[in-house]
Amino acid sequence: MTLDYFGVKNAQGGNLQLIVVVSDEDGSNLRKWVLPPDGVASVGNFEVKKLDQRVFHTESAKGNLKISILAYHRDQTKAVNLALIGMMEWYYGDSISFLKNIVLNMPVNDKLIGWYENEWYPDEKWGIGQYKEVGSDDLKVWFSIWSDAAPPPISPPTLKPDVRIESVKLGGADPPWQAKKNQGIFQEFAYPQYSVLITVVNNESVDLTVDWAGLSDTKEGFGSGSITVPKNSRKTGTATVYFSSSGQFKITYSVSRGGAVLDTWSGMVNVIP
């Protein structure tokens, strides 16, 4: 079994650690790993970390293979404070031992933020040539279970947030739209101009900043910008546009994050002279 990548939707401040437990059917071949082995991984929201970690190898397994992967947010407050007190002890000596006792008795606020559990059967051939993208809550893991020959490596995966375009309105109206073509040499200063309102819905448990942009089939741009949408909420962005050509055009708006397109929307507009 290899664990190649993992990521989380809401990293809750980073400092993540994975617990991996693998056992066969009767539990006699039980193994447990803590990843990364040297401490915690600093992970941002929707960031995917590369591990390339072989976590399990055995010559034989009895019956079914059971797998559990858990992601914890590790509270580092106590470790940081103890390190600080260690520096202070060097200067002040035993006179601050009471501070050390206070820190040692501080509660540790570790939190389980995601998990994956499954049972693999021998007739599945241990997933030869397959990588699984699985997880519950905020956790996503990419791993393989194989025998004989390892599957080929996968391309670096991405973890996209659930962000959608709810509506796009031109001048406050729903599509299909009708607009007038601008006249004159300096079209950006000539009327009519129209306001575009794009409403974006964020279905995740964290605030997200996304980019949006509009493009017609004439390759002409129709507004763009960035918008920060609160968690489990919606927000509307605006832009002012004008039309330099007449005819019927299809306008497509997209919303993206880090260059990855999350959603698209299309509507028709009839531009009259």
Image (tube, rainbow, N blue to C red):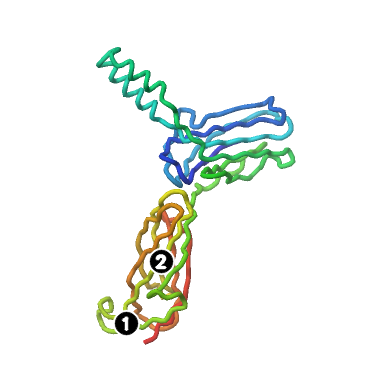
**Element carrying mark 1:** loop
Count of numbered circles on the image: 2
Please indicate whether residue 157 sits to the left or right of residue 246 in the image.
right
Q: Amino acid at mark 1?
A: Asn
Where residue 36 appears, x then y in whole percent? Answer: 48, 32
Where residue 228 appears, x then y in whole percent? Answer: 37, 55
CA separation in Å, label 2 and label 1: 22 Å
Residue 183 lies in quadrant: bottom left
Q: Which residue is mark 2?
A: 198
Where residue 225 appears, x then y in whole percent? Answer: 35, 62
What is the quadrant of the C terminus in the image?
bottom left
Residue at far bottom of view: 273
Q: Which residue is mark 1?
A: 182
Going from N to C along the chain, the mark reached first, 2 or 1, is: 1
Please indicate whether residue 271 sits to the left or right of residue 32 in the image.
left
Mark 2 near mark 1, Cβ–Cβ under 8 Å? Answer: no
Does residue 57 show up?
A: yes
Q: Is residue 111 above or below residue 266?
A: above
